[in-house]
């Protein structure tokens, strides 16, 4: 059974600082997603990572994937208050119906 | 624009009543749709995979007789919460993952409050 572990679960940081959120998963997969969720809203797609070594960047966020280590990271550079949200990683199983399983989420609060 | 349309966005109902939530794939034909449930400050938990023209596949611990799923066409899946109780109050989100695009799209979600 695929398990997705995300840490930290809660992160409070100052504006301008850098930080990394980690996502580990337990079995092989060919797809990993990062999503953002604002309170009371649905999910906003940030990144889709498909291959080992994949790195994608959008603004102050950069995501990477190491399929051998079964690890993805979401790096935040020079955080701003608008990045405050909950961030989820999600992994698609490559067996048993190709289901997308979510990590517990990281609640990020950026202090102005 | 939205790829997945979910309706209603908010519903309040009395205990014991049934509630139907619709999920429409606007830009893609979807033989498969996914239904998730999210309790406050928790992650999304996959409830079931809706399969067009056949029975849904439910995750362990999800009561199929309580959460009825119908996927009658390539663009519409419905989730009916039957005999709803306060513990069913949650945020329900549907999703479409059209292959081979690899991107998974989510509806806006339905917030269900059972009194």
Image: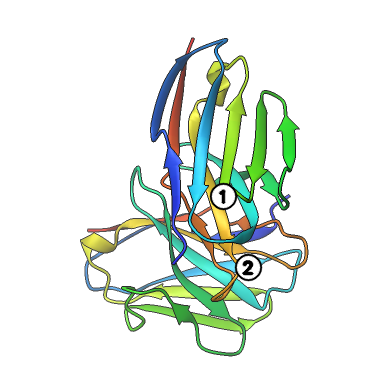
Q: Quadrant of residue A78?
A: top right
Establish if A55 lies above or below B111: above
Establish if A82 lies above or below A87: above
Q: From the viewer's perspective, tell me whether residue B23 is left or right of residue B85.
A: right
- The chain to which mark 1 is attached is A
Q: Position of residue A85 (x, y in %)?
A: 49, 31
Structural crowding at the residue carrying mark 2, measured as other residues with C-alpha within 10 Å and reported as few (<14), some (14–19) or many (≥20): many
Image quarter hosting the C terminus of chain B: bottom left
Q: Which residue is at a point 51% across and 32% down the rendered structure image?
A: A21
What mark, if any, has residue A70 been given in the picture? 1
Spatial distance from mark 2 to mark 1, Cα to Cα? Answer: 34 Å
Of discs 2 and 1, which sits in the foreground?
1
Q: Secondary structure at mark 1?
A: loop
Q: Position of residue B31 (x, y in %)?
A: 67, 78
What mark, if any, has residue A54 been given in the picture? none
Q: Secondary structure at mark 2?
A: strand
Q: Position of residue A69 (x, y in %)?
A: 57, 47
What mark, if any, has residue B24 been given in the picture? 2
Structural crowding at the residue carrying mark 1, measured as other residues with C-alpha within 10 Å and reported as few (<14), some (14–19) or many (≥20): some
Q: Quadrant of residue B41?
A: top left
- The chain to which mark 2 is attached is B
Number of numbered discs on residues: 2
The answer to whether residue B95 is visible is yes
Q: From the viewer's perspective, tell me whether residue A57 is left or right of residue A36.
A: right
In front: A87, or B90? A87
In front: A9, or B20? A9
Q: Which residue is at a point 43% across and 47% down the rendered structure image?
A: A5
Q: Position of residue A87 (x, y in %)?
A: 51, 38
Q: Quadrant of residue B28?
A: bottom right
Q: Which residue is at a point 41% across and 49% down the rendered structure image?
A: B43
Q: Which residue is at a point 64% across and 60% down the rendered structure image?
A: B4
The answer to whether residue B112 is visible is no
């Amino acid at each position: 059974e695929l398990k997705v572990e995300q840490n930290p679960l809660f992160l409070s940081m100052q504006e301008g600082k850098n930080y990394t959120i980690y996502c580990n998963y337990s079995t092989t997969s060919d797809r990993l997603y990062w999503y953002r969720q604002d309170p009371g809203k649905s999910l906003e797609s940030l990144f889709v990572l498909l291959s080992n070594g994949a790195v994608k960047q959008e603004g102050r966020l950069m995501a990477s994937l190491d399929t051998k280590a079964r690890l993805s990271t979401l790096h935040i550079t020079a955080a701003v208050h608008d990045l405050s949200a909950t961030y989820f990683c999600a992994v698609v199983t490559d067996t048993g119906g190709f289901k997308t399983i979510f990590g517990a989420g990281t609640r990020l609060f950026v202090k102005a | 624009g939205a790829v997945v349309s979910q309706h209603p966005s908010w519903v309040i109902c009395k205990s014991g009543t049934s509630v139907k939530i619709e999920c429409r794939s606007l830009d893609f034909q979807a033989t498969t749709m996914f239904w998730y449930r999210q309790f406050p400050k928790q992650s999304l938990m996959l409830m079931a995979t809706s399969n067009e023209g056949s029975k849904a596949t439910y995750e362990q611990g999800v009561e199929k007789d309580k959460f009825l799923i119908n996927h009658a066409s390539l663009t519409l899946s419905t989730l009916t919460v039957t005999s709803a109780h306060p513990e069913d109050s949650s945020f329900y989100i549907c999703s479409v993952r059209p292959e081979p695009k690899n991107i998974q799209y989510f509806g806006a979600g339905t917030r269900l409050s059972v009194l």
